[in-house]
Amino acid sequence: MFQNYIQKITAELSNELPGELAHLEMMHSNRKFLLDEKLDNYKPSAVLVLFYPNEEDKMCVLLIERTSYNGHHSGQIALPGGKKEKDDVDLEATALREFFEETGSNVTPEVIGKLTHVHIPLSKFMVQPVVAFANTKPLFSKSDAEVNKLIEWEIQDLINQDINQKTTIYVRDTPVVANYFLVENKILWGATAMILNELRWILKKAIR
């Protein structure tokens, strides 16, 4: 069953992506789409969207809860990832390197495609989501310096989420109204929510 899902998702990733239409559903109230002429101001980065079966053979995607630190994304629920380094041959390499650094996985995922890039105005990152899978659940040994917790989120929970949930979040002391996903009673919002909502659109088409 897992391999069947992966084949269907791979096929959907090769088609035209929902992109901004899916992103729009999870954009917060102060956010605007980025004009092309401003792209040079953003640092390239990547995250890994990893599918794998859990012990109950249910398909999951891996999330992380970041540690608390003096920075823009302190304590947030996110996908493993980070900025491109000079030795990374491409953004796929960035996503995999950051994934291994943050999770200590003993399994090398197989990349099957990409989602639409998302910019993060607050930290000036342009994020490329890279989609991959592992046939078995990896053994993880998280980076305590970067990751407070690894979260195994069943994709059915993502598919069934109510995307009309809204909350007020303060960004640089400015209140913004944000749509969010609820993950283990924690708020997942912003660019990660936009990425996961595009994934949600694709999963709903692939897994019917």
Image (cartoon, grey):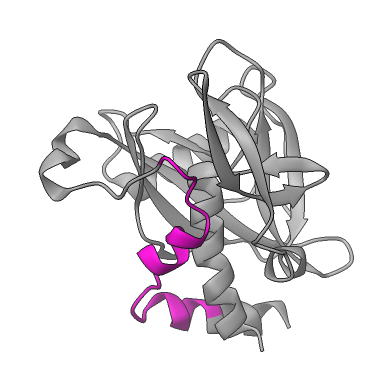
Residue placed most toward the observer, 79 or 50: 79
Question: Can you give x and y, in whole percent of width and height, for residue 62 in the image?
Answer: 67, 50
Quadrant for the N terminus in the image: bottom right
Residue drawn 66% across and 17% down? 68
**Is 200 left or right of 94, judged from the image as shown?**
right
Residue 14 part of the magenta segment: yes
Let me know if residue 27 is in the magenta part: yes
Residue in front for this viewpoint, 23 or 174: 174
Residue 104 showing in the rendered view:
no
Q: Which of 132/139 is in front?
A: 132
Q: Is residue 3 above or below residue 113?
A: below
Against 172, is 179 above or below?
below
* Magenta part of the chain: 9-30
Q: Residue at x 47, y 51 (%)?
A: 27
Asked whether, in this view, residue 42 is left or right of residue 133, the answer is left
Is residue 41 visible from the viewing direction of this image?
Answer: yes
Location of residue 198 in the rendering, given as x and y in whole percent from the top left corner: 49, 65
Residue 137, compared with residue 201, is above or below; it is above
Image quarter of residue 178? top right
